[in-house]
Image: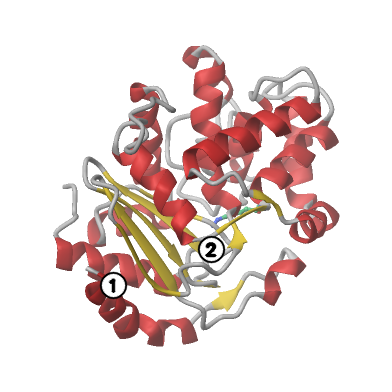
Amino acid sequence: MEKILEEVLNSNRKYTNYGQVAGYIPELKKAKRDDLGICVIDKDNNIYKAGNWDTKFTIQSVSKIVVLAMALMDNDWQYVFSKVGKEPSGDPFNSIMKLETNDTKKPSNPMINAGAIVTTSLIKGASLEEKEERMLKFFRKLAKNDNLGINYDVYKSEKMTGDRNRAMAYLLRNDGFIQGDVEELLDLYFKQCSIEVDTLDLARIGVNLASYGVDIETGERIIDEKVSRIVKTFMVTCGMYDASGEFAIKVGIPAKSGVGGGILASVPNTMGIGVYGPALDKKGNSIAGIKILEELSQKLELNIF
Ligand code: DON
């Protein structure tokens, strides 16, 4: 298997020359565009790695699936979906437009930034500190990595420049989808996006989702089974934003991307995959990462459809 991963990495290395490393969060510009890594964990807990599998990057939007799982376990689902929708938006991840034009003004889904800010607001905790602590604990448990932490340079960089998210959050509060202090909420959202991971961490979270929320080593249930299904469904319909349809056709695996360059993929009953390649297409998805997943899906027959 590791030989296959090496091959797939090498045959797609050329794609690291295309696209751009994210620049709208200044600190992310420091990523090395030709880094490329992958990690696969199968349901028997075999771990396979290749390339820059252990290079650290920030989780960014991949965090939205973990926080969605948490929000759905912390709250009544009906309440959650009264605040955030279930439909693909067909718009870019940071689009603000439908917060005005949607009938209800409700954010379309929990994968776009507006919807993710809502799910972050639904995390339970008596204080900001408690929410942050609960969140980090949940990420660490899913990734089976007690060392997961926040990259404070990236966090501060986004906090300084995240006015688009700020604008959306104020609109969301105006329309009753979030409550309380907007800056505090954004603090938590920016921190969740700035959690530093490698492809092994993503593959671990992916294999947990592939196993319907059960830790494959210990048998402990970490995510409610039905919640794990909802999360994977959102990954298929909205995980790659306005490229989700094409990705579903070409790759056919539930996946979530982040502007840090990571993609987490989860093949039900089979494996979790983490890929890293920081050069992105215009939709904010890793170009080489998508190509690698496409080839791997064909080679290993992973298409779920
Ligand atoms: O809120 C933002 O814009 C970033 N922290 C996360 C966006 C992101 O990763 C979109 N994914 N491809």
Q: Give the residue type that dot 2 points to.
A: Gly
Q: Where is mark 2, residue-wise?
A: 284
Task: Determine the residue positioned at 29% across, 36% down.
Answer: 211
Ligand 1 is in which quadrant of the figure? bottom right
Q: Is residue 152 visible?
A: yes
Left or right of 85 on screen, residue 40: left
| Quadrant of res 86 | top left
For label 1, the SS is helix
Q: Is mark 2 within 8 Å of ligand 1?
A: yes
Residue 81 visible in rendering? no
Quarter of the rendering occupied by the N terminus: bottom left
Q: Is residue 52 left or right of residue 115?
A: left
Quadrant of the rendered structure where residue 250 is? bottom left
Residue 90: x, y in percent?
45, 49
Above or below, 17 against 5 in this view is: below
Q: CA distance from mark 1 to mark 2?
A: 24 Å
Q: Which one is earlier in the sequence, the residue at label 1 or at label 2?
A: 1
Q: Label 2: how many residues lie within 10 Å, few (<14), some (14-19) or many (20+)? A: many
Most foreground residue, 282 or 146: 146
Q: How is the image coloured?
A: secondary structure
At label 1, which amino acid type do we have?
Leu
**How packed is label 1: few (under 14 Cα within 10 Å), some, or many (20 or more)?**
many
Q: How many numbered marks are there?
A: 2
284 is higher (above) or lower (below) than 254: below
Which dot marks residue 5? 1
Q: Nearer the viewer, residue 42 or 263?
A: 42
Q: Nearer the viewer, residue 243 or 273?
A: 273
Where's residue 55, x and y in %?
Answer: 55, 69
